């Protein structure tokens, strides 16, 4: 089963949208494998956004991501990285299609509510920033047979 990292960003918490967005992932049939609320430190922000640290927009990004708590999560499922990113929609809420999470709830590029890994390598790297292996619980919901046919996972 593929895994992905998802972060409900400060604007998502401040606006009280975590439950609504989490529900959309659960209703899709994605498996929640880990979740915790935390405050990102500047050091964690630099680790998470390592590829952006030297870019001119980074100070504003760090200020935003450390401004309020976030909820970090790991989801699993077939093609979960692609599925989550498609559910989120375009990075900018102004360009995201209606029906996507950002299209329905965001009108900003930076305040786009949720971050999700863009590749298996990113997922592995991001998961290890926020979770220890013991915090990730692989499990089979009793209704799993109603979300995917045998052999699809």
Image (cartoon, rainbow, N blue to C red):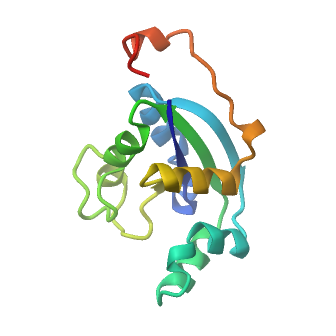
In the image, residue 140 lies at what x, y percent? 58, 17
Give the quarter of the figure containing the C terminus: top left
In the image, residue 92 lies at what x, y percent? 32, 65
Query: Left or right: where does residue 101 sit relative to residue 58?
Result: left
**Which residue is painted at 59% across and 56% down in the image?**
126
Query: Left or right: where does residue 47 sit relative to residue 152?
Result: right
Establish if 150 lies above or below 34.
Answer: above
> As rendered, which of 13 and 147 lies closer to the eye?
147
Query: Left or right: where does residue 53 sit relative to residue 106?
Result: right
In the image, residue 16 lies at what x, y percent? 54, 49
Residue 54 appears anywhere in the view: yes
**Which residue is painted at 57% across and 15% down in the image?**
141
Residue 67 appears anywhere in the view: no
> As rendered, which of 137 and 107 lies closer to the eye?
137
Establish if 107 lies above or below 25.
Answer: below
**Which residue is painted at 29% across and 53% down in the image?**
103
> As rendered, which of 15 and 65 lies closer to the eye?
65
Query: Left or right: where does residue 133 sit relative to residue 143?
Result: right
Q: How many numbered discs?
A: 0
In the image, residue 146 lies at what x, y percent? 41, 10
**Residue located farthest toward the bottom when viewing the structure as drawn:** 56
Establish if 36 lies above or below 146.
Answer: below
**Which residue is painted at 46% across and 42% down in the image?**
21
Establish if 72 lies above or below 40.
Answer: above
């Amino acid at each position: 089963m593929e895994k992905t990292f998802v972060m409900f960003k400060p604007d998502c918490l401040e606006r009280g949208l975590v439950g609504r967005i989490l529900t959309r992932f659960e209703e899709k049939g994605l498996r929640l494998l880990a979740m915790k609320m935390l405050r990102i430190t500047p050091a964690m922000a630099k680790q998470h956004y390592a590829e952006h640290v030297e870019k001119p927009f980074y100070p504003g990004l760090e200020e935003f991501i450390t401004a309020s708590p976030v909820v970090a999560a790991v989801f699993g499922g077939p093609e979960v990285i692609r599925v989550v990113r498609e559910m989120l929609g375009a990075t900018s809420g102004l360009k995201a299609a209606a029906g996507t999470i950002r299209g329905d709830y965001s009108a900003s590029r930076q305040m786009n509510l949720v971050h999700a890994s863009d590749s298996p390598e990113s997922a592995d790297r991001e998961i290890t920033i926020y979770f220890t292996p013991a915090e990730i619980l692989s499990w089979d919901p009793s209704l799993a047979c109603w979300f995917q046919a045998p052999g699809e996972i």
